[in-house]
Structures are given as C-alpha cells and as structure tokens.
Amino acid sequence: MGTDTVRTDEADEAAGRRREQRGWYFYDWACSVYSTSVLTVFLGPYLTEVAKSAADTDGYVHPLGIPVRAGSFFAYSVSLSVILAVVIMPLVGAAADRTGRKKPLLGAAAYLGAAATAGMFFLDGDRYLLGGVLLVVANASQSVAMMLYNSYLPQIAPPEERDAVSSRGWAFGYAAGSLVLVANLILFTAHDTFGVSEGMAVRICLASAGLWWGAFTLIPLRRLRDRRSPATGGTEEATAPGLRQLAATVRDMRRHPLTLGFLLAYLVYNDGIQTVISQASVYGSEELDLEQSTLIVAVLLVQILAVGGALGMGRLSRRYGAKRTILGSLIAWTLILGAGYFLPAGAPLWFFILASGIGLVLGGSQALSRSLFSHLVPPGKEAEYFSAYEMSDRGMSWLGPLLFGLTYQLTGSYRDAIISLVVFFVLGFALLARVPVRRAISDAGNPVPDRI
C-alpha cells in the first residue's frame, strides 16, 4: 500500500512537472514574435528610414543634441536598451529569489514590453525619437521577462531533462515566429489588396507582435508556480536598496569562479549572435539592396530551420555533450559571417543560403547555452544567477551593436560592420574551451550528468 502511494505521488509530481513545462514553452511562443517580427525584420529598416526622413542634409539626426548618423540610430538604441536592462535585471532577480514571487514580476515585465511594442503602431513620419523610446522600453522589458522565464528551467526540469526541455522551448518560439511571419509576409506583399500603404502594413505588423506577446503570456502565468526558496530566510532583503542587492549578487557569484568563466564566454559569443539577429535586416536592406519581402522570406527560412536546428543540436548534445556541440556551432558562426562579408548585392539566392546556415545553428547554440548554464546555478539562486545570464544573453549585448554602429559610422560600410563581429565568436570559443564544465557543476553543488 505504501509503495502504491509513493508511485501515485511520483506520477502526480511528474504530471504536474509536465504541465508546468508545457506552460513554460508558451512564453517562448509569446515573446519570440517580438524578437522575430520586430527586432529582426521590420523595426531596423523602418526606424532607419524614419530617422533618415528626420535627418539633416549631412544625414545626421540630433537626439538630445548629439549628432548621430541616421543609419546608426537603430543600433545605438538597441545598445541603450540593454544598458538599461543591465541596471534593472540583478535587482529584479534578487527580489524574485528572496520573495519567491516570480510570476507577478514576469507578468509586469511582459505586459510593459507588449504595450510598448503595440505602441509602435504610432511610429510614422519623422518620429524617430518615439521609435527609439519604444524600442528601449520593449527590449529592456523583454530582457527582464526572459531572465525570470529562464530561471524556471532548473525548477521545472531535472538535470537529465534540461537540454531537451530548453530545446523544445526554443523550438516553440521559432515555430511561433514562423507562423506570424507568414501572416506578415502576406500583409506586406499584398498591402494594396488590403487597402493599406506599405508603411501602414509595417506598423500593423509591429503592433500585432505586441498583441500576440500579451495574449499568449496568459498561458505561462496560469500554469507556472511560484516557489519560496529554502535557501532564503525571509523577504526583508527583497526591499534592500538596489545597489546593495547588486553588490550582494556580485559577491555571491565570485564564490563560483567557474560559473563566472562560463558567463564571460557566453557574454562574448552571444553578443555576436544577438548583434547578427538585430542587424541582419539592416545589412540586407542597406548594403545588399534587398527588398523587404526578401528579408521577410529569409527570416522565415531562419525560423523554420531553427526549429529543426534546436532539436537536432539537442540530440547532438546527448552524444557529444553540450559544451562540444556549442563549440562546433561557434565555428559555424565564424564561417557564416565570413561568407556574409562577400555576399553580392542584389542576389537573394545567396542571402537565402546564408539564412539557412544561420537557422541551423541559431536555435541550438542558444538552447544548449541556457541548459548548460542551468547546471551551474547554485540551488536557491536561480533568478539571481539568471539575471547575470540574461545580461550576457540580451542585457550585455550592447558591445556588438555599438561596434557595428561605430564601424559603420567611421567607414560608411555595412560590410566592414558585419565582419567586425567575427571577433566575438573567435574570443568566445577560446574562453568557453577553457571552462571545465564538470568541475563547475560540482562546485555549484549540483549533480553532474553522465554527459555534459
């Protein structure tokens, strides 16, 4: 009788865990449309054109009196948004761990970002400053929400399931991005049929991403559970001054130097990945003279292949380990950027081939990095440590856009700007190769999987 009761309890626990995991996947489904339709496809070229319409005769706009080449405004706005996220995320992460109330914070960040994205419907004429402000708010909010979302992974999946669960989450996100991009492509290419201008079609696509984000966030908010960490005694420190919380996070992380070593490597190579994602459409439209419809098809191709790439690299990690699989993907990223430098202008076929390569490595490199880091987090510190991870994921990804924007501002060449990003993948490979991940997992106080 006792054995039957134990089995029933285990079955109920497994069923509850699977229900949470399915709810968790849906936040990727909700917010990835922002990353795809807004950040990767439409906002970069559109905001660049809006900035150009507001520029002076020399091609400069002057936000707060600072001369900025119109073609660099989008990249600088992305950098500003992630600097803001760097300040906010450690504070929110520490509060989430100490109070055990991640869900309300996740909901607040998600809906602030969704509202800012929906507000992009009003971005027209020469309102480049409005576009910059909405981008900063939406991107910073997404970073905070993703930090909280990622911190659920070690709580809803045991070590042996994390690569698979993380990969499925990314696959859900890319599937949603593909679905919405098909609708975007239909609206954009046939905007005359629908009786709207091209600019209005873009604004509808931007705003609809915010509505999608807000609507589907309801599912994870219903299914995920808040947990009070046994490692935290009370809630008093959650109201401590922000700088004190940030200092406490840094001090605690210094006790785990191998975890910090992984974060440094991830900070570097993921900076390159995020910059490629955010600047690829600008490169395609401004340097390669490709039509917006061509860019949409290319990004759609990336999304579709990224689903298979995430799941396929998850299988590779079971054979070769997550670390080796990630290192292989960084070699592929370096080759892709080198090929991108030599792409001929006005040649969609070659751009589609390049997009295919990006799709095959994009989802897997991100999914496996997330699952690998989840093994390096000390129990009870999930949100706090994932705030640092999210800094590396989106929050610290301001160096890449800044380098991209500065290179273009100094040379006037987007080809020089795109090839400058190779340094992130080469240096990231070297740093990750030096991290002894098995020892890092053990030092964090977690069980070491058979293959990692």
Image (cartoon, helix red, strand yellow):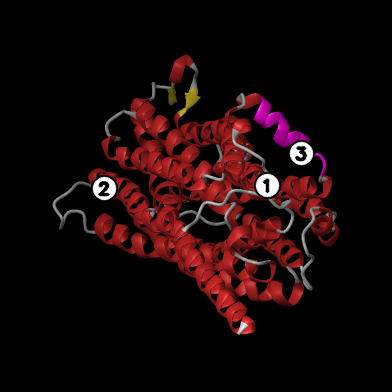
Can you identify the residue that label 1 sits on?
A: 381
Q: Position of residue 349 (x, y in %)?
A: 47, 66
How far apart marks 2 and 1 lie (CA) works out to 40 Å
The three-letter amino acid code for the residue at tag 3 is Asp
Q: Position of residue 162 (x, y in %)?
A: 64, 66
**Which circle's residue, 2 or 1, is located before the other in the chain?**
2
In the depicted structure, whether residue 353 falls above or below residue 290: below
Q: Residue at x 27, y 34 (%)?
A: 124
Q: Residue at x 47, y 48 (%)?
A: 103
Please report the bounds of the magenta region as a residue range: 244-255
The three-letter amino acid code for the residue at tag 2 is Ile
Q: Quadrant of the N terminus?
A: bottom right
Please state the total of marks drawn on the protein image: 3
Would you say residue 411 is visible in this rendering?
A: no
| Camera-side residue of 93 and 60 | 93
How far apart marks 3 and 2 lie (CA) works out to 45 Å
Crowdedness of circle 3 by 10 Å Cα count: few (<14), some, many (20+)?
Answer: some
Is residue 252 rendered magenta in the image? yes
